[in-house]
Image (tube, coloured by chain):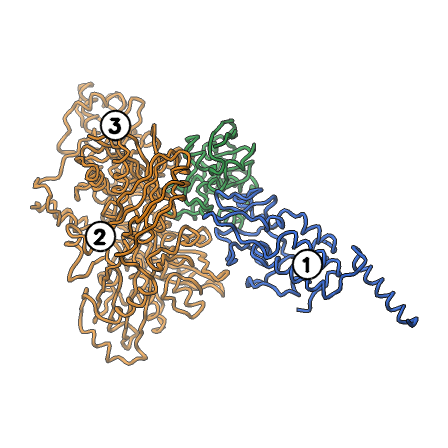
Chain colours: A orange, B blue, C green
Amino acid sequence: MLNRRTFLRASSAAAGGMLVSLYIDLPARAQSPALPIYPPDAFIHVRPDGTIVIQVNRLEFGQGVQTALPMILADELDADWSHVVGELAPAADVYKDPIYQLQMTGGSISVPHSFQQYRELGAQMRAMLVATAAQSWGVMPAQCRTENSIVYGPANQSARYADLAGDAARRPVPGEVRLKTPSDFRLIGTPVRRLDSRAKCDGSLRFGMDVDLPGLKVALVARPPVYGGRVKSLNDREARGVAGVRDVFEVPIIRGGIGVAVVADTFWMAKQARDRLNIEWNLSGVEHADTSQMRTRYAELSRTTGNVAVSRGDVTVLDRIPAADRIVADFSFPYLAHTPMEPLNTTIRFDGDRAEAWVPSQFQTMDQIAIAEVLGLKPEQVTFHTEYAGGGFGRRTPLDSHVQREAAAIAKRLRGTPVKVMWTREDDVQGGYYRPMFVHHVEVGMDARGMPAAWRHVVVGQSHIIGTGPPWEGGLVKNGVDELVVEGTADSRYAIPNFHVSAHQPTINVPVAQWRSVGMTHNAFVMETLIDELAVRAKIDPIAYRLVLLRPDAKKLRNPLALLDEKTKEWRFRVPRNHAVGIACNEYHETGVACAVEVSIESSRPRIHRATVTADVGMAINPLTLEAQFQGGIVYGLSQLMANGAITFSDGRVNQRNFDGHTPPYMKDAPVEMDVHIVASTEAPTACGECPVPVISPAVVNALFRLTGKRYRMLPLATL
Amino acid sequence: MSGRKRLLIGGCAIIFVAAGRMTAGQTSRAEGLAAWQRVYSVLTHPRCINCHTATAYPQQGDDRHRHGFNVVRGQTGTGVPAFTCATCHQRVNADSTGVPGAPGWHLAPLSMQWQDLRDQIMSSGAICRVMTDRSKNHNLDGAGLLKHHEEEPLVLWAFQPGRGLDGSPRSIPPLTHAEFIAATRTWVEAGIPCPAR
Amino acid sequence: MANYTLTVNGRQTEVDVDPGTPLLWVLREHLKMTGTKYGCGIGACGACTIHVAGVAARACLLPVSLVGNRPIATIETMASDSVGRVVQDAWIATDVVQCGYCQSGQIMTAVALLKAVPKPTDAQVEQAMGGNICRCGTYVRIRQAIARAAQQLG
């Protein structure tokens, strides 16, 4: 089904993490033997004024791909960077990920999968421009050179790309192009500033939420307080009485539920109307998730063996280790919402035989298919625009495209009128698709050196993959264990000889999804705090302990730990009296990260004075973006420690409503200073954005232990 | 009546008049203390005490939790530059957005704190002593305190505190403003007595 | 519905809206000025920060009926503002933004700070910016950009 070349490329790209198996299991994958040809004119437009517009085949939601991919292309093209503009490409076959053959952003694949592609595109366009100029001068292309969007001939001739572009477009695209050697890169590998910066600083950049069209209506949906609930009775008299309200009707939503859509001329009118709906909900026949009940149930499960993920050596060795040399620990982690700053939104206009959609979408192909399905159209009948998104962190990645399906159902009813379906922050906080709640039960037995000789680990929590069928389930679920539930534990790089990891994955009526760094969010916390506890008991420095315990081939962790040691030598043993240092490390998507934090306690909260972060990410495409992603991921990871950092359920209802009840890190919760250091490398670039997230929470609580003597195993960190 | 007794009665009358200054000094200390308890019941209601904190932050809600969003007192009790009380609070209640408002929304000065640093409400006697300490209360005597209760916009606000975002009215103190004034007056007439505890 | 005359970025404009409509939505949907963002609607995040009579204000909480004749300044006018322009340039030089959705509010708050306190201390910066949320976590660069802007403003 797949030719070996493409399979190998998929394997070597490897960074897929949660998505690596998608390609392998897609049953309908085309039988073509080679990767598609990408026509440069679908990606590059040179305007007469010299502006070069580059289509970006991804969603820009803060990670900087809207700059990185144009950089890569512009470098090979020898374009004048000051005239380069990036645009987010609409949904189309030509913009699909070259390896996964889906238009999508996620799993840190954007640069690894499109690096070669965008280089080739730039080189091809350059070759066509040079050939055009050379022909007009009667010289050989090899006698020409290019720089800053100008072709220069051997006899001081010169021609602007802008003037050549029209003719160049009529030439055939060269099959073979010569790419630069890395030493010739002018942009790649350098700290290039973002292309979208000014527009984001002057209010002019349009996000999905900002889309406006003639005749646009706004819709809000009243959703049942328990997932899967339905409307029993609806009294919309008062709602319809609000000026500007156009329609009120029932609409199908997730899990067989029925909600009520309100359509009005503006958001405020829709909101006033929705607040005046009198709905009696039928909440029977669906499970009412309840946090305290789940805690009890999960705790019970965690004391029994689940589906086995790893069984190495003989873990019964543990039972023969004296109690004094054993640690028994229970951890719990709450549901977490993502709360990207831009709440969810989708704008659709349905015209009967076609439709148009404006979506800050992370999965354009799948969203387009979903919208088409609901509207009774073929995907190609849906013109799908990719809008800038105000953050994602996983909230825009549910595989069921539920946001788009719901919106399409509303657009269908409003045929001919464009409608923007908006989610309020309350809808977002209560709408599900959370990082699941997890409980861990761990028993560790130490040897004479203080190293873990035996380790028995049970993880309990929902899987968002089990039950979804192909293509995801086939690739990610083995022996009944979803890899994503145990990643960070099962694949730990620590050399623990007798190691047993199992998982229970209950089915709960709470929709769950991936949250930035997925399974690492809880598994790394457990591993890195237990390792710290072992290091303390063995009286060994926490960095040194890890370097002893890590497998010798764990390069991606050894390198950053060594660099961390070097970069923190000056201060980490000399912090003030009421400060302490905490260490943690983690490997994710082939990127290794290590972190040291200096923490004190102020007003009963951890105050992080500084964080030093080191990483082995292979070659850095843009060190400025990399630093930003690492700084940002550290702050995002601190969401787990916030006092109000939990989503909880009572009788099926989410207890939190908005940022007041589910509070993310503000400036004072973030490190005051952060320095990021990248291990020098010429290896292929690996992941970036998710990788720092798992290390910060364990690093901080490891520091707190040294201040309070307490081990913090129940998140969020409500009190110290 | 003996001469000494007349002197005693006369002396007491003088003392009453001197202390009272408002009336002919008919309000007893016991009545004054009872009135004070009614005043105290208003002062310690969330609508009042939420801004009479000992800390660098106000409180909000009937459960008097720490005001969210890292709102802080600042040097003058009006917040800090670029993040003042006026950033969100207007001169009147904004019921459509659930934000209480009154002219000059701000925190009571630290000298007028009615809670301790652990957000525990001070005793009746302790608050009374703070209220009547002229080195702490902007040099107000009894008449001044009464006027403050009658006219200060933020005091008036407590009795008409507007609605929350869900449309439900905020809870109000256990007395009406008129009752509050009457109790204050009685207390003042009694010479602003404070209970021992 | 009621009629209001608003002065926005130096221009007078009339709107016919429900009195309780927050200024945020008047700006975004009636005046089509989408630079000011909706992040939470309860004043918790600061994405909707504007200046009203020179004071930083959260537009999601301000009913249009309470604006009166106080002049309104939004992110759209900061490029023409002597402090605003310097702050924007500092933001760009420091490569602060990631997704950018919170940054209109961050910049409006920072401008208000620097107009009130040209040389803020770190503590003043943290308190002034302390109520603005950035989920992308750009806080460290925000601090650096404000320091840079303060220095440029002399």
Give the amino acid at mark 2.
Met
Q: Residues within 10 Å of mark 2 (few under 14, many from 20)?
A: many
Horizontal arrangement in the rendering, residue A56 relative to residue B19 (left or right): left
Secondary structure category for the residue under label 2: helix
Query: In this view of the protein, can residue C19 be seen by the observer?
Result: yes
Q: Position of residue A422 (x, y in %)?
A: 34, 40
How far apart, in angstroms, are the residues tagged by discs 2 and 3? 34 Å
- In the shown orientation, is residue B154 left or right of residue A627? right
In the rendered image, which residue does mark 3 sit on?
A45
Q: Residue A601: x and y, percent?
A: 48, 62
What amino acid is found at the position of numbered circle 3 in the picture? His
Dot 2 or dot 3: first in sequence order is: 2
Front-most of residues A476 and A316: A476
Give the labeled residue for mark 2. Answer: A18
Compare residues B154 and A481 and report the one nearer the observer. Answer: B154
Residue A453 percent coordinates (x, y): 24, 73
Q: Residue at x 25, y 46 (%)?
A: A106
Residue B7 x/y as whole percent: 89, 68
Return the residue nearer the eye: B117 or A678: B117
Position of residue A51 in the picture relative to residue B159 (left or right): left
Category of crowding for the residue at label 3, using alpha-carbon neighbours closer than 10 angstroms: few (below 14), some (14–19), many (at least 20) = many
What residue would you read off at disc 1? B131
